[in-house]
C-alpha cells in the first residue's frame, strides 16, 4: 500500500487548484440538530468555536477521504483520485468556508454535513470504503438541488463512461416541478481499487407528496421490470429511499428502503423476504448487539423496542424474473441508542468479531476522521448494518459521520434506549 502523506496532497476543485491538508480536523462548531432520517430531533450539537483559518467543506471532506482510503488499504494514487472525485461531485459547496454555517439543512447527517462515509466488511478481506454525497447541497431550493444532483451524476457518467438510462427512465417520478420532502438526490461512490468508483443514486419516494410515496415506488419498480416487487415487501411505516446502481455492477440493483418505528428484535428478524441469507436468529442477535440490548428476553414475553430514530430495512431487486428480493439489509441507528461513540465503537467491533471480520480498520478509521475522543461525542458512528446479497457472504457496514459542522455531545448518565411492551 502506498503511503499517504500526512502533510498535504494536491487536489483540484472545479476550476481551481487547491492544497488539502491531510491531517485530521480538530474543528467542530455549534449548530442545532434537525430531525434525523424519519426520527425525532437529535440532541443539541455543540463544540469549541470554529477558527476562521480558511478551511472549506471540501478541505475537510477530502482530508478525511484521503486518510480513510489509507485505512481501507487503497493506494496513494487511488486515494488522491477519489478525493478529487469527491470534490467534483460536491461542486460549488466544496469551496464554502467552514467559518460559515451550512447554507441549508441536509437530511444526510445530523449536523447538516452533506457527506457520510461507510466501511463495508466481509470476512478475510480489506473493507470497502464508500462515501455518500449530496451534490446539490446549497443550491437554494429542493428543485434546484435535484437539478444540480442530476447534472453531477451525468457528468460523473461521462467522465467514467457509464450509462444513466435507468435513472433517466425515472426522472419524471422523482423530480417533479415542485418537489416535497427532505432530499432530492444523493450520490454514493464505492471506492474500489483502480480509481473508478461504483456509483449509486438515492431518490426520494415522497417527492410528489408522502401520500404518493408507495405509488411512486410501485411505478418505479414496474418500469425497471420488477412488477410484483412491492407486493412482497414487509410492512413498514413509509418508504424512505429508492436507490439504483449505475455503471459497472455485476448485478445492478434497485433498492427500496423502509422505516420501522418502535421495532423489536423479534419483529426485525421477520423483515427479510430474500431467499437464503441471514436467518432470524442472526438478524435478532445483530439487532440486540447494535442497540445494546440484553439477549435474555423470553421468546413469548415482552421485548424492548427502539423508540427513537427508526430502524431501516433495505430490499434489493436484481432479477426481473424472480418474485422475491435478492438482498436484504437491516440498519440500526446506533447513535440514538448509545451514550457516546466509545460505546458505539465497542458494539461495532463486537459485531465485526462475531461475524469473523477484522475490526482494526474501523478503529483506524475513527481515528482518521477526527482527533476527538470517542467518549466526547455521539454520532460519529451513525448506523450499523447487516447485509445479505444472494450468493455472497454476509456483510457488516459501519456508517461514519464527517462532523464538518458540529459534534453531538454524549448523553448524560445511563441512556434508556428503548421502551418495553407487548
Image: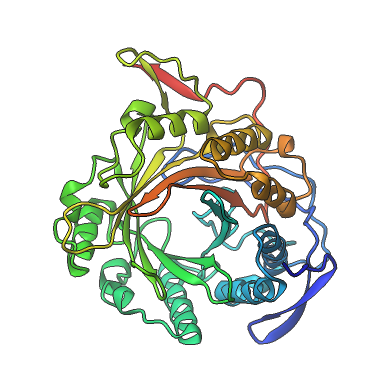
**Image coordinates for residue 54, horizontal then vertical, percent:** 80, 68
Residue lying farthest to the front in this orientation:
124
The answer to whether 159 is drawn above or below residue 135 in the figure is below
When the figure is inspected, residue 394 is found, relative to residue 165, above or below; the finding is: above
**Display coloring:** rainbow
Q: Position of residue 191 (x, y in %)?
A: 56, 67
Q: Would you say 322 lies left or right of 359 here?
A: left
Q: Is residue 30 visible?
A: no
| 10, above or below 255, in the image | below
Q: How many marks?
A: 0
Residue pictured at 63% horizontal, 29% vertical:
339
User: Which is nearer the eye, 358 or 83?
Assistant: 358
Q: Quadrant of the C terminus?
A: top left
* Residue at 54% across, 36% down: 351
Q: Does residue 103 show up?
A: yes
Image quadrant where residue 32 sits: top right
User: What quarter of the picture does the N terminus occupy?
Assistant: bottom right
The image position of residue 150, as x and y in percent, is: 42, 76
Residue 346 lies, with reference to residue 259, above or below; the image says: above
Q: Going 33% across and 16% down the picture, which residue do you hit?
A: 299
Left or right for 243, reference 345? left
Q: Is residue 408 left or right of residue 186?
A: right
Amino acid at each position: 500500500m502506498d503511503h499517504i502523506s500526512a502533510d498535504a496532497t494536491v487536489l483540484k476543485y472545479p476550476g481551481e487548484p487547491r492544497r488539502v491538508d491531510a491531517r485530521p480536523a480538530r474543528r467542530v462548531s455549534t449548530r442545532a440538530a434537525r430531525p434525523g432520517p424519519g426520527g425525532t430531533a437529535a440532541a443539541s450539537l455543540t463544540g469549541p468555536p470554529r477558527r476562521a483559518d480558511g478551511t472549506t467543506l471540501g478541505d475537510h471532506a477530502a482530508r478525511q477521504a484521503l486518510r480513510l482510503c489509507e485505512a481501507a488499504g487503497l493506494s496513494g494514487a487511488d486515494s488522491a483520485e477519489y478525493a478529487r472525485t469527491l470534490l467534483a461531485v460536491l461542486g460549488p459547496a466544496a469551496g464554502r468556508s467552514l467559518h460559515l454555517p451550512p447554507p441549508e439543512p441536509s437530511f444526510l447527517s445530523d449536523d447538516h454535513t452533506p457527506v457520510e462515509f461507510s466501511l463495508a466488511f466481509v470476512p478475510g478481506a480489506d473493507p470497502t470504503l464508500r462515501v455518500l454525497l449530496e451534490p446539490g447541497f446549497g443550491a437554494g431550493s429542493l428543485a434546484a438541488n435535484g437539478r444540480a444532483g442530476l447534472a453531477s451524476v451525468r457528468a460523473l457518467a461521462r467522465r467514467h463512461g457509464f450509462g444513466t438510462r435507468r435513472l433517466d427512465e425515472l426522472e419524471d417520478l422523482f423530480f417533479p416541478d415542485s418537489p416535497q420532502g427532505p432530499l432530492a438526490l444523493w450520490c454514493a461512490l464505492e471506492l474500489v481499487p483502480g480509481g473508478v468508483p461504483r456509483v449509486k443514486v438515492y431518490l426520494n419516494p415522497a417527492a410528489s407528496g408522502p401520500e404518493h410515496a408507495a405509488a411512486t415506488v410501485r411505478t418505479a419498480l414496474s418500469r425497471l421490470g420488477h412488477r410484483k416487487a412491492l407486493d412482497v415487501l414487509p410492512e413498514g411505516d413509509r418508504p424512505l429511499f429508492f436507490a439504483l446502481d449505475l455503471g459497472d455492477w455485476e448485478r445492478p440493483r434497485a433498492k427500496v428502503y423502509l422505516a420501522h418505528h418502535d421495532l423489536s428484535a423479534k419483529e426485525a428478524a421477520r423483515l427479510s423476504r430474500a431467499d437464503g441469507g441471514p436467518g432470524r436468529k442472526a438478524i435478532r442477535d445483530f439487532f440486540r448487539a447494535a442497540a445494546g440490548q440484553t439477549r435474555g428476553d423470553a421468546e413469548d414475553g415482552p421485548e424492548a423496542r427502539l423508540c427513537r430514530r427508526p430502524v431501516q430495512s433495505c430490499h434489493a431487486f436484481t432479477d426481473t424474473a424472480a418474485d422475491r428480493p435478492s438482498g436484504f439489509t437491516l440498519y440500526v441507528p446506533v447513535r440514538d441508542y448509545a451514550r457516546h461513540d466509545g460505546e458505539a465503537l465497542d458494539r461495532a467491533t463486537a459485531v465485526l468479531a462475531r461475524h469473523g471480520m477484522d475490526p482494526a480498520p474501523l478503529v483506524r478509521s475513527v481515528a482518521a476522521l477526527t482527533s476527538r475522543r470517542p467518549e466526547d461525542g455521539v454520532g460519529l458512528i451513525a448506523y450499523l448494518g447487516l447485509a445479505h446479497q444472494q450468493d455472497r457472504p454476509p456483510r457488516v457496514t459501519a456508517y461514519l459521520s464527517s462532523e464538518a459542522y458540529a459534534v453531538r455531545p454524549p448523553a448524560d448518565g445511563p441512556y434508556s434506549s428503548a421502551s418495553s411492551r407487548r
